[in-house]
Amino acid sequence: MEALKLVQPEGLEALDLDAINARLADAGAEDVIAWAASTFGDSLLMSSSFGSHSALMLHLATRVVPRIPVVFLDTGYLFPETYQFAEALRERFDLRLEVYNPRMTAARQEALFGRLWDGDDADLARYQQVNKIEPMQRALRELRGRAWLAGLRAQQTEFRAGLRKVELQDGVFKIHPILGWSKDDVERYMDEHELPLHPLYAWGYKSIGDVHSTVPVDPGEDDDRAGRRLGEKRECGIHLPSPDTEASRKSSGL
């Protein structure tokens, strides 16, 4: 890949997203991460759900940026195996793990609001806001994150199919190094580097989140997000722009 001009943005206008995406269109995942590291420096971080194939992005990112902050959102509703998997990967990759929790405990939430994940769209939105969106925003603020690596792939959902490798979400640059990867690409990389799957994957859990919104699926299920109960868009909330940001995104051509 031809070297990109490095930019140290002082404001959001400092990056031309159309030009950047054109230049990164055919770049490999490590090249995209290297560009992000050079461009954003210490203000680059990543998130990990420590789900089925999370070892892939952790391996990719830490090869380029060994001490990149890794934000882990502990909703209080994760599987025991997820906590164990996260600890195993922390040790394996010597991760700089930054764990963020909701300001309200799970017990208090259920006492005051009931089982929000079983409610209507407004209840689900409140659940996402309290347990995922606010903690992620707090992490970005406290860690001074200007840019965020995420392992989203276009094949996973209709929303993700419309993304580019670099986007602007709620004032933060989102970088998607493996956006164009297929399931075969993922499996090939996992096998090549002998990376572990989440322990529950062997039990039929393809996409693993909170215990109440994740169920095992049939062995022949081909949908990457099968088994997730996350609302119409099948997103966990942190990867969706706020309504105001989405309107701005459309009007600006992003």
Image (cartoon, helix red, strand yellow):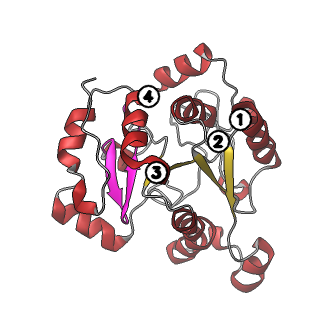
Residue labelled with disc 1: 198
Q: Which stretch did the figure color magenta?
A: 163-181
Above or below, 26 against 46 in this view is: above
Closer to us: mark 2 or mark 4?
Answer: 4
Residue labelled with disc 3: 148
Mark sitting earlier along the chain (1/3): 3
Closer to us: mark 3 or mark 2?
Answer: 3
Q: Amino acid at mark 2?
A: Gly
The answer to whether mark 2 and mark 1 are in CB contact below 8 A is: yes
Q: Measuring from the top left, give residue 40's x and y in whole percent.
A: 40, 49
Q: Nearer the viewer, residue 82 or 72?
A: 72
Residue labelled with disc 4: 30
Quote the CA–CA distance across marks 3 and 2: 18 Å
Closer to us: mark 1 or mark 4?
Answer: 4
Quote the CA–CA distance across marks 4 and 3: 15 Å
Mark 2 element type: loop
Quote the CA–CA distance across marks 2 and 1: 6 Å
Q: What is the crowding at mark 4: few (fewer than 14 residues within 10 Å), some, or many (at least 20)?
A: some
Quote the CA–CA distance across marks 1 and 3: 23 Å
Checking the image for residue 51, the label placed there is 2
